[in-house]
Amino acid sequence: MNINIDNLQAEEFRLQQLANYLFGQSRASVGTSPSGIRLPDTGNVVNMKAPQTALPDPHFPSGGSGATDLAKLSTLSQLPIFDYMQYHQDYYFLKDRPVAQLPEMGNFPVDVLRKEFPILQEYVNGRPLVWLDNAATTQKPSCVIERISQFYRKENSNIHRAAHQLAARATDAYESARESVRSFINAGSSNEIVFVRGTTEGINLVAYTLGAGYLKSGDQVLISNLEHHANIVPWQQLRERIGIELVVIPVDDSGQIDMEAYKNLLTSKVKLVSFVQVSNALGTITPAKKMIQWAHAAGAKVLLDGAQSVSHMPIDLQELKPDFFVFSGHKVFGPTGIGVLYIQNDTLDELPAWQGGGNMIRDVRFDNTTYQNGHARFEAGTGNIADAVGLGAALEFLRTIGMHSIAAYEHQLLLYATEKLKQVPGLEIIGKAADKASVLSFTLADFSNESVGKHLDEHGIAVRTGHHCAQPILRRFGQETTVRPSLAFYNTKEEIDWLQDALFKLISQR
Ligand code: PLP
């Protein structure tokens, strides 16, 4: 194996950060501060108008509940993580790497990481909880839970607008979270990061603002057959409002985008292509980079729905180059009620304002109001400050583990789970694309999907049954509903074995 020294140094740094998380050093030691104030206990001079990042913040006691327990359990040198992290490959897109050459799953410190998630120690119906409903929402690590608690204990204030200590701390924390988001998705600037309620709100914001000028009656918006309702309904509403045409890119029988059909649909009438990076119903990973390049070559803007991709693979927006990217905090181990809309800089100032109110204005007079530039223009009113800070903590946590490592581990787990499910007589997997992440939708002959879900719940196994808010794609495969286990990096082979055992028990009742 070729080992790149720069990569190794980066990994060492990341390991050190991981050690900080796991073994109890300060978890909230970076921040930004608003202006005009010298914080007496830190000596930081804060800048209200242009907050800076990475000032040390001593307001947090070192360690936390999860960290203390973990410290008793293990030491960093026992963590078999290092070999694993030497891999800087994107397995999903590396077609020429045989599966046999992937690192062993055993190298990923899943048992240690699971202990960071208190809810994974729960029992349900007398059995250890097996959380396989990650596509619906993910569980939260202690560092996120503690970070939100610390915010309310030590920092709570409205942001940006006051000249007191707590406003400085809260603004620090909020702007620092924005920087964590920027770095996690490799956006060019934190100015491009708008905090919203979630993916749904982000897509609605884009539909509304593009519909106020950029899109005109008769223009086409392309979406794919794979989309979640959140990426269908706002465009239908826009069709009603201004008369755009909504055109659907078909998928092939494996559940992958039909690229030939896509190419033919990309005419000069298309002004926007809006599609999902990972399908929540089938798990298909779409060829996003190529689709974006083709759309841009045809003169269209692109919205990429990252709701199901951010928790499973590294995201590099400067490489992918979408005009918009959206995701929800709760699907990436962060809180509910907070999400991110990335708007690429060139598009940012072309868009009209969305909601009006405080924070988004520069100057208000009865006869005329001027607006802020950049992300502030889209963040009217008081946002979800504490949960933005919680989301920042979640992304920092993931960064310390490493998204390449997570992607590789999950890929192996998905292959393992697929094989295990295939062994269950009468089970049909819905969605067989070559590139998939996390999701295993299936039906089981002779059993309703609901009864399968209930049976699994009796065994402590949480899966989703239903239409997964993606009815068009399920109907494409002749289904109204499916059973949908979905994986995250804290799931294990053992849990998959329990899932298979429970399904065998069910079919023995046939
Ligand atoms: N897009 C996709 C692909 C999803 O999976 C989901 C949620 O499941 C959404 C959008 C909507 O996300 P939220 O409900 O967090 O706004």
Image (tube, grey):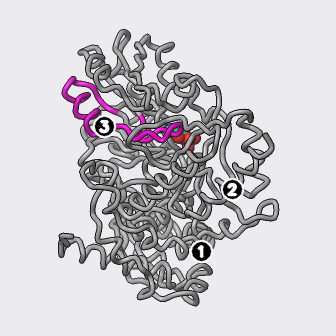
Q: Quadrant of the C terminus?
A: top right
Q: Is residue 129 magenta?
A: no
Name the residue carrying label 2: 501
Name the residue carrying label 1: 115
Which span of residues is magenta-colored?
A: 276-302
Q: Nearer the viewer, residue 364 or 125?
A: 125
Q: Residue 220 at what x, y percent from top left?
A: 35, 16
Judged from the image, the secondary structure of the residue bearing numbered disc 3 is loop
Snapshot quadrant of residue 44: bottom left
Please report whichever mark, 2 or 1, sits nearer to the chain's N-terminal start: 1
Q: Residue 285 at what x, y percent from top left?
A: 40, 41
Q: Callout 1, which amino acid?
A: Lys
Please name the residue shown 44% across and 26% down the image.
253
Task: Work out how far the residue at label 2 is from the one at label 1, CA to CA, in angstroms.
Answer: 24 Å
Q: Quadrant of the N terminus?
A: bottom left
Name the residue carrying label 3: 323
Task: Work out how far the residue at label 3 is from the one at label 1, CA to CA, in angstroms.
Answer: 38 Å
Judged from the image, the secondary structure of the residue bearing numbered disc 1 is loop
Determine if the C-beta at disc 2 is less than 8 A from ligand 1: no
Q: Callout 3, which amino acid?
A: Asp
Please report whichever mark, 3 or 1, sits nearer to the chain's N-terminal start: 1
Q: Residues within 10 Å of mark 3 (few under 14, many from 20)?
A: many
Q: Residue 231 at what x, y percent from top left?
A: 48, 30
Q: Residues within 10 Å of mark 1 (few under 14, many from 20)?
A: many
